[in-house]
Amino acid sequence: MEKLCIVVPCYNEEEMLPITVPALNDVLKDLVAKNKIDPESFVLYVDDGSKDQTWRKICELHETYPNACGLKLAGNVGHQFALTAGLLSAKDLCDVTVSIDADLQDDVAVIEEMIDKFHEGKDIVYGVRSDRKSDSFFKRVTAQGFYKVMEFMGVKTIYNHADFRLMSKRAVEQFSKYEETNLYLRGMMPLIGYETDSVFYERKTRVAGESKYPLKKMLALAWNGITSFSIKPIGFITGLGALIVCCSILAAIYALISYAWGHVVPGWTSLILSIWFIGGVQLLSIGLIGQYIGKIYIEVKHRPRYNIETLLK
Ligand code: UDP
Ligand code: MG
């Protein structure tokens, strides 16, 4: 029987944990009773440098629920890194992992379905939202726009899948070889290439605490997703540059022909506008290239992506 580890990144989740821990304990108990997983299966709560009592809550709950284990990171590194820390630490302690957010907006009931698919031989099973009813109009529109942009940029992503997924031990092992610092897990998983499947569920609203993903962090994640997986934006500005050069050549020909015909093209305004426009495009282009160089700079330093303080097992 395979040992399951559910990995849960937690940042300031003291209000959510007293609800989440018993709920995930029930999930494990149920799966053990159905003989689907090893009785030694456990949940790994990763405290991502929380400022509140999250770690104390994890330690307290560990007394009541021995299968609720903890991993304390030395500082806040963000959801993607916290999840990576959890997965890579769990890799040596179990045979299969499931990652889920601490707020249980994702439906724990489909974990069983994930395990069934794992037993059928799938290495990665994606949890996919069947609808976005629980989202605000704004989040729905921006999220869908984002998937469209990613597709346009040529990045393989699973539509409406966040980081709720099952990964076999060998999938996590393969993932551990991707050592990049600019992490965008959703884009990386399809690169692993093992057999995958999806399960569908309706996402609920958060029952306690507030979202730790404000618009700023969401935009940062989306931007990171694009620039870590695609160099198409650089291609676009090259194309744009070529287009502007062509336009300016045409404008020069027009001005010369007009001059030959005896009338000068008037235009201080057009002159200033074109200087500003081209200046703007140049700045934008340099900035965009700078973004990629910045990423190279961060990657070559090869710093540790997270530091582990304590493992509570
Ligand atoms: N999270 C984290 N580190 C952070 C921010 C968030 O570990 O810096 C965790 C958080 O505790 C939660 C998950 O990431 O378990 C997703 O966050 P949240 O539910 O707030 O995002 P939303 O569902 O609103 O997109
Ligand atoms: Mg959430």
Image: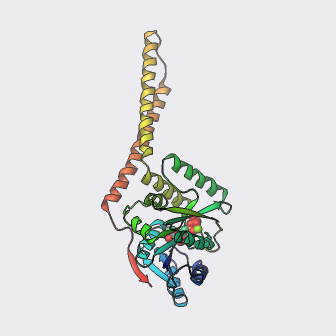
Q: Does residue 225 appear in the picture of this structure?
A: yes
| Quadrant location, the C terminus | bottom left
Q: Position of residue 29 (x, y in %)?
A: 58, 83
Q: Can you name the residue that lies furthest to the bottom here? A: 63
Q: Does residue 103 appear in the picture of this structure?
A: no
Q: Where is residue 306 in the image (x, y as percent from the top left)?
A: 39, 70
Relative placement, left or right, of 304 versus 153 is left
Q: Where is residue 205 in the image (x, y as percent from the top left)?
A: 65, 68
Relative placement, left or right, of 266 versus 27 is left
- Say which of 264 and 12 sits in front: 12
Q: Can you name the residue that lies furthest to the top here? A: 261
Q: Position of residue 151 (x, y in %)?
A: 52, 49
Q: Can you name the residue that lies furthest to the left here? A: 301
Q: Can you name the residue that lies furthest to the right here? A: 133
The quadrant where ligand 1 appears is: bottom right
**247 over 233 or under it: above or below:** above
- Say which of 266 and 303 sits in front: 303
**251 over 67 or under it: above or below:** above
At 42% from the left and 41% from the top, the residue drawn is: 235
